[in-house]
């Protein structure tokens, strides 16, 4: 079984992927600079939690109601703001998010929790009708799967970071013919540092993936694997829907508006309508992430949906790459995991975290993956045949 602490972190990564993609549709593909996305997350979370706790509504209906209500609020705030651009739209959406937070503080505390928030929303595992006989095997398989995925991502990350660092060093020294050698030197230094601290790294890895607890009685009663499977399938479904939406006629129109509004208008496209529709779609998926958030976190309060939450999701989109589904997905994972992975440095954690973000923005201003074309380039390099590389050489 996966350590409960890291289990929560992984689930938050999956939730934040949906949350980041909901903003990526608005900012990355349509060019609307919205800065109050945390307000939609709060609407989705409180709607689903109150319907389940106070009204005894089934979970699936509560989640759908949260998505629809959040989309309605997106339509409501988007209609008067659809003609705003840049800083004006950012200020308007930020004001909307602050209004939502203050209203939640002022509503009756016996229903909405007041400043202390909602702490009795049932965990999503209580709604999964899974036979107990499958739990032990399911937990073991998912633990092994996540361990293999973690090793693969760590290896890809180390290789990409060493390549990036080697290119920057060679560019600094104005030497372009030794990038390959520099990459291997940097990679060797990273591996050496890993071997020096191998005991701590291996202990941390075994603490996260607790293989020994896979077949104990506690594992047989745990639905950890089913929750992971549900969240993962939800994320894949959302990414598939967004990909189809972007490649549809409506999605092409939204991208055209981002590129040039005047030229798009000359083609007979109703800019206001498509902006409003796109804003509503993004709000719908933000409500879905809020509903999942409500049934994952044991306690949430209005302060969790403040301005800094909107900045976090904006960082996910910008760091990964605006207008890129893989980019926003990668950005959500980095922004969620990085602060927790740096806890071993103590009080310097936030300083290093901010410094890394600054360096990323200096050397990769368009984001790690940049655009969809950059993501496709990465995939082509990964699946490139050896003979193609030899011909190119």
Image: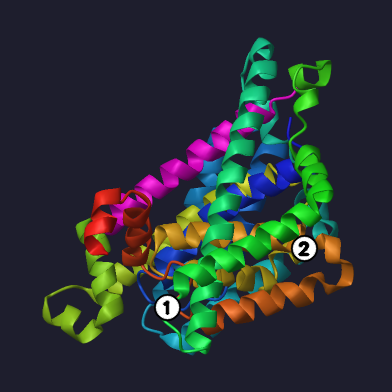
Residue interval drawn in magenta: 221-246
Splitting the image into 4 quarters, where does residue 295 fall?
top right
Nearer to the camera, 28 or 49: 28
Splitting the image into 4 quarters, where does residue 8 fall?
top right
Give percent across and percent down for residue 172. 52, 88
Q: Mark 1 or 2 closer to N-term?
A: 1
Splitting the image into 4 quarters, where does residue 338 fall?
bottom right
Q: What residue would you read off at disc 1?
A: 80
Give percent across and percent down for residue 52. 67, 37
Residue visible at 69% across and 73% down in the picture: 308
Where disc 1 sits, the SS reads helix
Say the numbered circle drawn on residue 298.
Answer: none
In reply to whether residue 204 is colored magenta, the answer given is no
Foreground disc of the pair 1, 2 = 2
Residue visible at 74% across and 29% down in the picture: 1
Q: Is residue 28 left or right of residue 319?
A: left
Crowd class of label 2 (few under 14; some 14 to 19; many from 20; radius 10 Å) = some
Principal SS element in the magenta part?
Answer: helix
Nearer to the camera, 160 or 145: 160
Taking the image as drawn, is residue 350 in sight? Answer: yes
Query: Is residue 152 positioned above or below 184 on the image?
Result: above
Q: What residue would you read off at disc 2?
A: 342
Query: Is residue 124 positioned above or below 24 on the image?
Result: above
Give percent across and percent down for residue 157. 56, 58
Query: Is residue 366 positioned above or below 6 on the image?
Result: below
Nearer to the camera, 292 or 16: 16
């Amino acid at each position: 079984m996966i350590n409960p602490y890291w289990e929560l972190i992984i689930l938050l990564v999956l939730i934040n992927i949906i949350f980041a993609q909901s903003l990526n549709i608005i900012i990355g593909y349509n060019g609307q600079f919205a800065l109050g996305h945390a307000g939609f997350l709060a609407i989705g979370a409180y709607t689903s939690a109150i319907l389940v706790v106070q009204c005894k509504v089934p979970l699936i209906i509560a989640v759908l109601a949260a998505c629809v209500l959040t989309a309605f609020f997106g339509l409501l705030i988007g209609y008067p703001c659809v003609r705003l651009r840049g800083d004006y739209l950012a200020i308007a959406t930020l004001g909307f998010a602050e209004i939502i937070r203050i209203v939640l503080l002022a509503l009756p505390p016996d229903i909405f929790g007041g400043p202390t928030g909602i702490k009795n929303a049932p965990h999503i595992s209580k709604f999964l009708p899974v036979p107990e006989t499958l739990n032990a095997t399911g937990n073991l398989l998912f633990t092994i799967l996540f361990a293999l995925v973690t090793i693969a991502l760590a290896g890809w990350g180390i290789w990409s970071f060493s390549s990036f660092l080697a290119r920057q060093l060679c560019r600094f020294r104005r030497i372009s013919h030794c990038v390959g050698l520099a990459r291997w030197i940097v990679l060797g230094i990273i591996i050496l540092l890993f071997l020096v601290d191998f005991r701590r790294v291996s202990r941390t890895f075994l603490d996260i993936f607790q293989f020994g607890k896979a077949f104990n009685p506690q594992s047989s009663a745990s639905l950890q694997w089913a929750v992971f499977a549900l969240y993962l399938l939800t994320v894949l479904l959302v990414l598939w829907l967004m990909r189809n939406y972007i490649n549809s006629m409506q999605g092409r129109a939204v991208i055209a508006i981002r590129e040039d509004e005047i030229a798009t208008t000359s083609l007979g496209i109703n800019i206001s309508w498509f902006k409003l529709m796109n804003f509503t779609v993004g709000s719908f998926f933000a409500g879905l992430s809020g509903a999942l958030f409500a049934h994952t976190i044991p306690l949430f309060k209005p302060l969790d949906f403040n301005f800094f939450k909107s900045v976090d999701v904006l960082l996910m989109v910008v760091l990964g790459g605006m207008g890129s589904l893989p980019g926003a997905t990668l950005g959500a994972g980095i922004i969620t995991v990085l602060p927790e992975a740096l806890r071993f440095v103590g009080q310097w954690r936030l300083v290093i975290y901010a410094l890394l973000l600054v360096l990323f923005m200096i050397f990769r201003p368009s984001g790690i993956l940049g655009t969809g074309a950059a993501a496709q380039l990465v995939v082509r390099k990964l699946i490139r045949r050896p003979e193609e590389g030899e011909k190119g050489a």
